[in-house]
Amino acid sequence: MNDGDSPCFDAIQYRQIIGSLQYLTLTRPDIAFAVNTLSQHMHDPAIHHTLLLKKLLRYIKGTTEYGLPISRSTLQLRTYSDVDWASNPLTRKSTSGFCTFLGDTLVSWTVKKQPTVSRSSTESEYRALASATADTIWIKRLLADFRISHSQPVDVYCDNTSTIALANNPVFNGRTKHIEIDQRFVREHIQNNVIRLLPISTTDQIADILTKPLTTPRFKELRSKLTITSRSSV
């Protein structure tokens, strides 16, 4: 019998492990996408889901010394927003991912499957951008409660040029009617100098690690940019 012929865990064990890993993502954003994907099958995990979970546990075992350091740096916020359009092969829903840095310290990150199907990559990017904007505004207000002023607009990086053009376009047309609320929300905060939407190349898009599976070299590169390092190297 091959390893792929039988599950590595039963359904109860699968749910228990995924529940524990969801807490681990609070300090290990590098596994956030994998945990998010596997948690979508908690109700009825297939054999290959248990095999993927076993591989994830092996990765965690080999990187137990890794974590997020808190370093002294500036108190400037910056956010990266990305999406994997229609990534779910069954529902064709997209996966949003965004992360926010306070200086050199990663303070917030999110991986989430979008609730509705997007008809274009621009639409899915815009939905992710609206969620990232809302999270960034919340962090900015939280800093204000600690009397940390952030008078400059927060830089929000997006690698989709159509989304950036749409956000900066004052003309609203019928083709964007289905994302009108998200467009008006983001544009209003751009006009009020709350955020500043900037382009970034896909190569430098840190949030890419939160939206899709990557090759090992690419994964390690973005993991390093998330500032996830081993304890011995800090």
Image: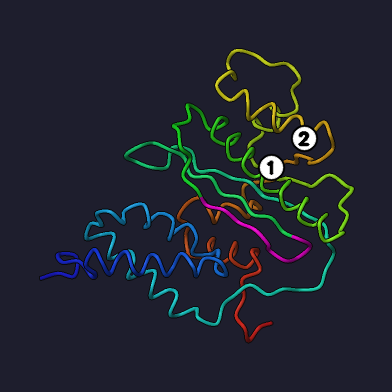
Range covered by the magenta-colored residues = 102-111
Indicate the quadrant containing the C terminus: top left, top right, bottom left or bottom right. bottom right
Indicate the quadrant containing the N terminus: top left, top right, bottom left or bottom right. bottom left
Q: Secondary structure at mark 2?
A: helix
Q: Left or right? Give the position of 29 relative to 62.
A: right
Residue that appears at 68% across and 16% down: 172
- Marks 1 and 2 in Cβ contact (< 8 Å): yes
Q: Which residue type does callout 2 highlight?
A: His
Residue that appears at 21% across and 60% down: 47
Q: Nearer the viewer, residue 69 or 157?
A: 69
Main SS of the magenta part reads strand
Residue 213 falls in which quadrant of the image? bottom left
Most distant residue in the left direction = 1
Disc marking residue 57 = none
Decide whether residue 86 is among the magenta residues. Answer: no
For residue 203, above or below residue 229: above
For residue 91, above or below residue 80: above
**Alpha-carbon neighbours of circle 1 within 10 Å: few (<14), some, or many (≥20)?**
many
Residue that appears at 59% across and 45% down: 82
Decide whether residue 106 is among the magenta residues. Answer: yes
Coordinates of residue 138 in the picture (x, y in percent): 71, 49
Q: Nearer the viewer, residue 59 or 15?
A: 15
- The residue identified by callout 2 is 189
- The residue identified by callout 1 is 133
Question: Does label 1 or label 2 sit earlier along the sequence?
Answer: 1
Coordinates of residue 192 in the picture (x, y in percent): 84, 34
Q: Which residue type does callout 1 highlight?
A: Thr
